[in-house]
Image (spheres, rainbow, N blue to C red):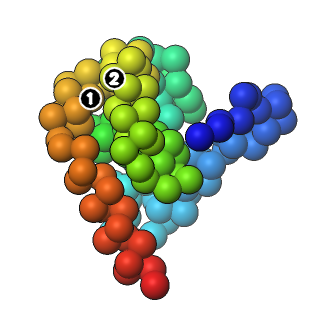
């Protein structure tokens, strides 16, 4: 799978706005106030190098720390789940434990059998049809 090398500074600024946009939509929707924090914080990095606030570790909401891994997994598998893409995702996420991702959550992610991701994707795709 080929991944785009990097974004231009303009593309990066536009991309980073999606955290705030998601937050605003969810925060003003009754029943989704808690989810708004996940949307706002899912690009924060465990080591504090993320955005939009640069918070780190346990200061990042738990749901956002979990969602960050799910988001990366989905991005890597977006061309279609395969044993290769799942292995690539597992390796990339493992390498980023303690930097981008919460190491405890990474450990739980890695304990899950690889075939579960293929089955989950198949279920989601079949519900769309």
Residue 76 appearing in the image:
yes
Name the residue: 30% across, 52% down: 117
128 to the left or right of 15 = left
Q: Which residue is mark 2?
A: 94
Mark 2 vs 1: CB contact within 8 A:
yes
**Residue 70 percent coordinates (x, y):** 37, 45
- Give the vertical position of 95 relative to 126 (above or below): above
Question: Considering the numbered disc 1 on the image, is that residue within a helix, a strand or a loop?
Answer: helix
Q: Residues within 10 Å of mark 2 (few under 14, many from 20)?
A: some
Name the residue: 26% across, 21% down: 103
Q: Which residue is mark 1?
A: 106
5 to the left or right of 59 = right
Disc number at residue 43? none
Is 117 or 10 nearer to us in this picture? 117
Ranked by sequence position, the earlier of labels 2 and 1 is 2
**Residue 22 percent coordinates (x, y):** 55, 55
Name the residue: 45% across, 80% down: 128
116 to the left or right of 124 = left
97 to the left or right of 41 = left
């Amino acid at each position: 799978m080929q991944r785009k090398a990097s974004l231009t500074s303009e593309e990066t600024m536009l991309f980073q706005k999606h955290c705030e946009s998601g937050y605003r939509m969810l925060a003003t929707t009754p029943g989704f106030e808690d989810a708004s924090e996940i949307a706002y914080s899912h690009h924060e990095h465990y080591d504090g190098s993320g955005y939009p606030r640069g918070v780190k570790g346990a200061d990042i909401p738990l749901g956002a720390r979990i969602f960050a891994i799910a988001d990366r997994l989905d991005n890597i598998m977006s061309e279609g789940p395969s044993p290769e893409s799942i292995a690539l995702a597992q390796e990339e996420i493992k390498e980023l434990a303690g930097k981008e991702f919460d190491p405890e959550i990474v450990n739980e992610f890695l304990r899950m059998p690889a075939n579960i991701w293929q089955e989950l994707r198949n279920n989601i795709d079949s519900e769309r049809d």
